[in-house]
Amino acid sequence: MGKKQLKNTEWIVLIVSVTLAIIGLVALFSATQNTELAEFKKQIQWLLISIPFLILAASIDYNVIVKFSTLAYIILIVLLIGVLFTEPINGATSWFKIGESFSFQPSELGKVITILFLAFIMNKMQLRGRDEINKIWKLIIILIFAAIPLGLIIIEPDYGTALAYFVAIVFMIFTSGIDKRYILLALIALAIAAPIVYNNLPEHALERIQVFLNPEDYPRTGGYNIIQSKLAIGAGEIFGMGLLKGNQTQLGFLHPKTTDFIFSVIGEELGFVATGAITILYIVLVTKSIYIAKTAKDNIGSYIAIGIAGIFFFHMTENIGMTIGLLPITGVPLPFVSYGGSSLVTNFICIGLLLNISSRRQKAILVE
């Protein structure tokens, strides 16, 4: 990077992500005492693996990267189809096993690929003008390309990841200058479809909704995890019970404590001060991502950044919300903090792209 690029770069997104990753390692160190720190050690390995991906995503001009997004999108679809024929893990066919120790979740990396590909397509369609996005046939093409990976992920089934895709896509389309009439029609269609979808949900999905609404009615089955999570966070109070001293964490009542409920581990052992600080860090990360989208030098950069903002926003809101009982449990990890190699690498690629886009702005000031 030249001096101008270094000056323009929003380094705060890197600082926030590294801070969250460190907090995650501390929490994983405490949560994996009974497993000889197995996941803690693997997370360090994945963190080191993430570094070259971060550097590449930050260094190569994003306009060059998106040129390969069509090929990447095709490979992604093949992988999402292939993963459907793998052995289910926790009821979902979402992972390719790599040896005995590692697994790869294509839908995680697929978030970035889908964002890049849609940004590429949307930009191509708007070469003659921003309002081109409102031509119905062009909008339908975009929605079809968005729906293919989304549908395959739903089939796995992985509703949490599918929702992350959906939010990112909505953020991107909204930013593209879509006409308000389409937004109104979408809201009407959603209102009509909601009861129909609800009445046709599979049994396990309906059970999750019932558990969310009345977890105390399922204390030994579906409601067990959320009850233990709320107990853990409540026990932490302001300053926490102390690292390695959380009852729910160390006695094994929280499950899975290294992924879905890592926020509960932090709440119990480090208290409201730590969880409040984490929430603020995520708010900074999301708002900075939106700012980068607004100040990007071109539409492609803007679409990529806002899509990433949607991913981070959804994961933050859903994971924290589900651990405190405000949202249904969907198995969505907390970015940079929860254990998971595919997730960690993907998140740092997103950070690299944000650094990339911000560094190539003309000025590091708000452009009206």
Image (tube, helix red, strand yellow):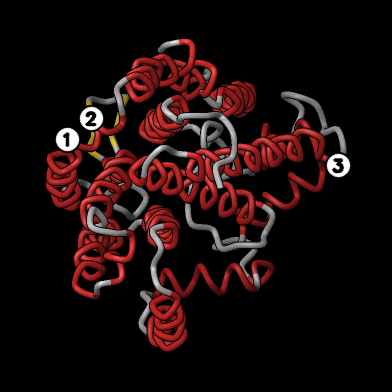
Q: Position of residue 151 (x, y in %)?
A: 25, 63
Q: Residue at x 44, y 39 (%)?
A: 296
Q: Amino acid at mark 3?
A: Glu
Lower position in the chain sequence, tag 1 or tag 3: 1
Q: Amino acid at mark 2?
A: Val
Neighbours of disc 2 within 10 Å: few (<14), some (14-19), many (20+): few
Cβ atoms under marks 3 and 2 closer than 8 Å: no
Decide which of 125, 40 is in the foreground and name it: 125
Q: Residue at x 62, y 40 (%)?
A: 282
Q: Position of residue 52 (x, y in %)?
A: 35, 15
Kindly indicate the quadrant of the structure image that contains residue 253.
top right
Give the residue number, with chain letter if any, for mark 3.
237
Cβ atoms under marks 2 and 1 closer than 8 Å: yes
In this picture, residue 354 sits left or right of residue 127? right
Q: Residue at x 76, y 40 (%)?
A: 276
- Residue at disc 3, secondary structure: loop
Neighbours of disc 3 within 10 Å: few (<14), some (14-19), many (20+): some
- Residue at disc 2, secondary structure: helix
Neighbours of disc 1 within 10 Å: few (<14), some (14-19), many (20+): some
Cβ atoms under marks 1 and 3 closer than 8 Å: no
Give the residue number, with chain letter if any, for mark 1.
68
